[in-house]
Amino acid sequence: MGKASFQQVKGFTLIELVVVIVVLAILAAFALPRFASLESDASLSILRSFKSIIQPAADITHKEIILRPQNKNANETRYNFDDGDQIRIRADYPDGRWDNTFAILVDWSSYDIGQVSANTCEDTDPEWCVRQRGLNWFVNRGYTTATEGRGFVIFPRGNNVNNDECYVYYFTPNPSGTGVSQGKPFTRIVTTDC
């Protein structure tokens, strides 16, 4: 009878396993924050795109209103486009209302966006919520010193527009109707809590 042959089985030692686990932990410590910030980066990118849409739309509309004053109503609170759409205006600028101004001025169909009546954008709401805000909201945050005006804020799902500073806003510092302009409307991004 012949001799039995045994093959030597090689495996990892305990030290090698510990080294592999430590290396993986170090890699995860560097990689996870990068992956976690991708969502924040995406939100910032979308906020920037909102700003790049809103302000030019306001500027172009203002120019059209100046060129076609006959399209304003008698008390100069509304402007009628040639296609029949009507928006609200303040001192020849688009009003800071979403539902009857910017929802009409811009084609938002590429975004999951909608107006909400609450300060929190819930899980059942669109990905991006819009909340109209009066003068005091902007004054209390130091965004303006105007004495008249209004605006709107676009913020992501899961955030509260009063508590989470992650939004883009549009504000027109002008009176409603035929009042004298207090200034050009502006669009800004706030990213403290993004």
Image: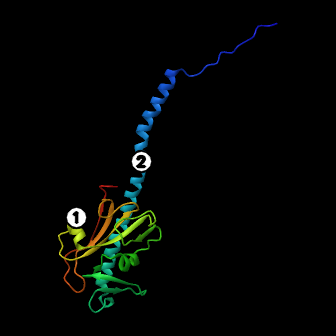
Q: Residue at x 37, y 57 (%)?
A: 44
Place of residue 22 in the rendered image (x, y in percent of width and height, measured from the top left): 45, 29
Q: Is residue 85 left or right of residue 176?
A: right
Relative to 32, residue 7 above or below = above
Q: In which quadrant of the rendered view does residue 80 lie?
A: bottom left
Quadrant showing the N terminus: top right
The residue type indicated by label 2 comes to Ala
Q: Residue at x 17, y 75 (%)?
A: 147
Place of residue 70 in the rendered image (x, y in percent of width and height, measured from the top left): 31, 91
Q: How is the image coloured?
A: rainbow
Q: How many marks?
A: 2
Q: In which quadrant of the rendered view does residue 94 lie?
A: bottom left
* Of the pair 14 and 110, the residue shown nearer to us: 14
Secondary structure, mark 2, is helix
The residue type indicated by label 1 comes to Arg
* Of the pair 17 and 86, the residue shown nearer to us: 17
Secondary structure, mark 1, is loop
Q: Is residue 98 left or right of residue 171?
A: right
Q: Alpha carbon of mark 2 to alpha carbon of mark 1: how far?
A: 29 Å
Mark 2 burial class by Cα count in 10 Å: few <14, some 14-19, many 20+: few
Quadrant showing the C terminus: bottom left
Place of residue 167 in the rendered image (x, y in percent of width and height, measured from the top left): 33, 62
Residue at which label 2 appears = 36
> Which residue of the protein is positioned furthest toward the right in this rendering?
1
Relative to 79, residue 155 above or below = above
* First in residue order: circle 2 vs circle 1: 2
Q: In which quadrant of the rendered view does residue 176 lie?
A: bottom left
In contact (CB < 8 Å): disc 2 and disc 1: no
Relative to 49, residue 97 above or below = below
> Which residue of the protein is positioned furthest toward the bottom in this rendering?
74
Relative to 171, residue 89 above or below = below
Residue at which label 1 appears = 141
